[in-house]
Image: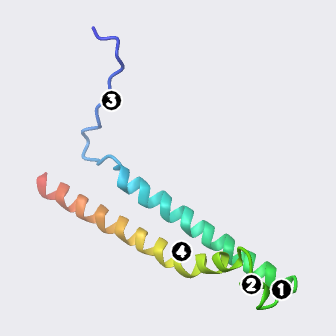
Amino acid sequence: MSTHPTRPEPPDDGTASVRRIDRLLAYGALALAAASILCFFAIIIGTSTGMDQDAFGEGVWPAVAALPTYGLPLAFLMIVALLIMSFVRKGRAGKRS
């Protein structure tokens, strides 16, 4: 009998385990979309408090303005890639059974 812990076997009921790349895409898309939405609200709040166009060009504001511009489409593409990978994996699993 071994004293080393063993890895549990994946279930053999036809369900596929979640791969690392799937988890990375899912959490990355979630984090990117959440950060983009927070930056979007920061711009709305900054505008409502009286900041003008010149104030948004200084400091960290250019990065805050760029994140929703590029972050939301990138998060969408990450979700699409995750869905495509999932469909392909399930299609291959269906052909095997």
Picture coordinates of residue 75 (x, y %)? Answer: 48, 71
- Quarter of image, res 90: bottom left
- Point out the frontmost of discs 3 and 4: 4
- Point out the frontmost of discs 4 and 1: 1
Picture coordinates of residue 33 (x, y %)? Answer: 56, 69
Picture coordinates of residue 65 (x, y %)? Answer: 65, 80
For mark 1, what is the residue? 51
| Distance between mark 4 and mark 2 Cα atoms | 18 Å
For mark 4, what is the residue? 71
- Quarter of image, res 60: bottom right
Label 1 Cα neighbours within 10 Å, binned few <14 / some 14-19 / many ≥20: few
- The disc at residue 56 is 2
For mark 3, what is the residue? 8
**Marks 2 and 3, the one that precedes in the sequence:** 3
**Marks 4 and 1, the one that precedes in the sequence:** 1
Mark 1 residue element: loop
Mark 3 residue element: loop
Q: Residue furthest right?
A: 50
Is 22 on the left-hand or right-hand side of 50? left
Residue occupying the point 37% across, 56% down: 22
- Point out the frontmost of discs 3 and 1: 1
| Distance between mark 3 and mark 4 Cα atoms | 37 Å
- Point out the frontmost of discs 4 and 2: 2
Q: Residue furthest bottom?
A: 53
Is 34 on the left-hand or right-hand side of 12? right
